[in-house]
Amino acid sequence: MNGLLEIYGEYHEAIHGYLAMLTLCSERAFILFFMFPPTADGVLQGVARNGVVLLFSSFIAYGQPASLFESMSGLMFVETFVREAIIGLALGFSASIVFWVAESAGTYIDDLTGYNNIQITNPVRSEQNTPTGTLLMQIATVAFWTLGGMPALLGVLYDSYNWWPLTSRTPVAENILQSFVLHQTDTLMQMTAKLATPIMFILLLVDLAFGFVAKSAQKLEVMQLSQPVKGALTVLILALFVGIFVEQVRGQLVLAGLGDYMRELAHGLR
């Protein structure tokens, strides 16, 4: 025991510096993994996710120069910490678009089907969601893990330290950040509309058909049957086209072009 205390006392500064550097280097990955749906609380719980983040971030901390922490003041440490959080937020926002699209399209479809009045609590993610939205999100998450999206995500994370190193103090222009958020939000809305449009068109035809029947035979009250029919059609269409959906967004599920996009964004910031 005394020997361990002597070793700790001898390497106290080195251990303290490495732990502080590990905390700083893990901020970018922690925000990314916390925000990214396939690694969020519904898939990776807090302790497991924190362990994974520390494991992957230890390589980054080990590669930093030894003099970095010694030359870093308290203000510089806080500034770097905030900057790393912003970079992780940008990475997580860009990588999560296709998963939010899947969930939003499912919610959009359920709204048109008529299930918006029975929104359920998702026990996996502990939040309000619709059945189709939960299904599409889980399909996208499974496709991400099975198609090899995690190595691509780690590649983007590690590559981000090349175009924005830990020691870089490049200022973030407000107008570029604003255009980035607007572009990603527009992409989210457009992809949601494109993904949900075919099913919505079929459900609209069902509504029109039941409307004509109800107008011709007003005493039958056939409109009460429209919701079960639309629900059954939605399940059938999803079963038929879920493979096409995964194939169409396969590149986005495995984050194929995310690294190039973030690299171009970083070059625009400089």
Image (cartoon, rainbow, N blue to C red):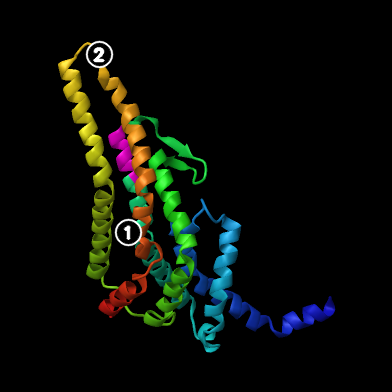
> Which residue is label 2 attached to?
220
Predominant SS along the magenta part: helix
Residue type (three-letter) at the residue carrying disc 1: Gln
Residue type (three-letter) at the residue carrying disc 2: Leu
Question: How far separated are the C-alphas under marks 1 and 2?
Answer: 42 Å
Instruction: Let me know if residue 99 is in the magenta part.
Output: no
Q: Secondary structure at mark 2?
A: loop
Query: Residue 200: x percent and y percent?
Result: 25, 41
Residue sitting at 23 percent across and 65 percent down?
179
Q: Which residues are magenta?
A: 106-113
> Which residue is label 1 attached to?
248
Q: Secondary structure at mark 1?
A: helix
Question: In terms of depth relative to the viewer, which is nearer, 36 or 58?
Answer: 36
124 relative position to 161: left or right: right
Which residue is the extreme one toward the front? Answer: 240
The image quarter in which residue 117 lies: top left
Q: Name above or below for residue 158 compared with residue 90.
A: below
Query: Residue 146: x percent and y percent?
Result: 49, 61
Query: Residue 29: x percent and y percent?
Result: 48, 68
Residue 80 in view here: no
Q: Which of the marked residues, 1 or 2, is nearer the chain's N terminus?
A: 2
- CB under 8 Å between discs 1 and 2: no
